[in-house]
Image: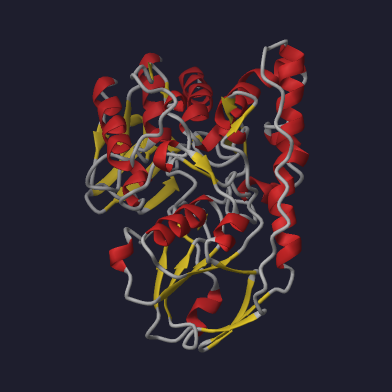
Amino acid sequence: MLDTLVVGAGQAGLATSYWLGRAGVEHQLLERRAALGGAWQDRWDAFCLNTPNFSLTLPGMPYDGPVPEAFMPRNDLIEYFRHYAEAIDAPVRTDTDVTRIAPAEDGSFRVETPHGSWRARNVVLATGGYQKPKVPALSARLPGHVLQLHTDDYRNPEQLPDGAVLIVGTGQSGGQIAEELLDAGREIHLAVSTCPEAPRRYRGQDIIFWMMHLAQYGPGYGLNGLTLGQLPSPAARFMCNPLVSGAGGGHDIHLRDFGRRGVRLHGHLEAADDGELTFSDDLPERLGVVERTFYQRMRPMFDSYIAATGMTAPDADPPRKDDWLPAEAASLNLGAENITAVIWSTGYRLDFGILDIPVLDQWNYPRHHRGVTEHPGLYAVGLPWLTGHGSSIVAGVGRDARFIAEHIAAR
């Protein structure tokens, strides 16, 4: 019997392996993909990391390259994780898809794969927060000749047929893909969600610098805005990340700028009847929410942190003011607008269908305390807002992984 099985060898699994190894815990990582690199391998060809290189702080191997403020492209990022796995000598079996995790009579676990079963005293769920593409049910009501892709399947503009493109959702992926298609000369329609815009840089630093420092050191100053306990509800664990881009050296994305460049902005996609689409008629209000949220929520936290620590930072620029408004109707005919492709930038959902253990809440999220689930010996790491804002990103996953490894070692 093995001591610990880690399901998944992306950033969460590898960080957990590092700390388990340091604690002397026998363990094995099982990775369903044929090669290491995690879900980053599912990003489009021109994808760049949205967090600067200095945020690549996996335990034992912080970024020490020549361009800490740059943004790593997809293929380099994949190689970074593969190099990390080699450097820490992570015991990984690739091409091994876990199909079922069930309790055994002696308190251990049976872990089933197509290549045989495992027994382990502990199991760590490190499958990440982006497990299954989420596509609205109304997608089934679109005409069959319209190509539909989730961002998980999008790779480049040449993949799409000639004609206009509707992108549904304006999170980071939707915003960046819209920009890529616009630069490629495509006609774009964009259904606007309420993911907040944010400045790429604030008071002399990339906003990720402030988020990392606030998450790690803020609680010591009584600033807990990026900790789990400050979320307004459990559903807020799945809220959008700020709409910024790492492409081209990193920059802001503003939806009104898209509109001025010819992108047709619409409200939330409410209904579809064959080729007739209906959107909410609240687009001006949506744009206001998108633009205000950073200044209402994030800016006060950053300013409070700077003041509490006594750090030297330039004065803040005034909030961007932009009164441009689109004039689109609340309905759209796909044929009349020659829309031949729809890209669903609608995020992902958790999928723990492999668990034959009743530990999931109504959001399919494991019930836990700091990643220690209600079922003894079962752990989770790398999920959005497991303990705080950084739990699912490279910059923060190591702290949670260390706690889990220490708990396992003590057990």
Question: Residue 299's image quarter?
Answer: top right
Task: State the residue at coordinates (44%, 26%).
Answer: 69
**Residue 219 appears left or right of 274:** right
Report x, y in % for residue 122.
Answer: 43, 33
Who's the residue at 77% across and 23% down the image?
304
Would you say residue 127 is visible in this rendering? yes
Q: Is residue 136 above or below residue 13?
A: below
| Residue 240 % position (x, y) | 60, 49
Residue 106, can we see it? no
Give the quarter of the image for residue 389: top right
Q: Position of residue 27 (x, y in %)?
A: 33, 28
Residue that appears at 41% across and 48% down: 101
Quadrant of the image containing the N terminus: top left
Toward the viewer: 35 or 184?
184
Judging depth in this view, the residue of 58 and 185 nearest the camera is 185
Drawn side of residue 400 relative to residue 295, left or right: left
For the point 58% across and 54% down, the residue is 364
Q: Nearer the viewer, residue 153 or 16?
A: 153
**Residue 124: x percent and y percent?**
44, 36
- Which quadrant of the view contains residue 138? bottom right
* In the depicted structure, whether residue 68 falls above or below residue 170: above
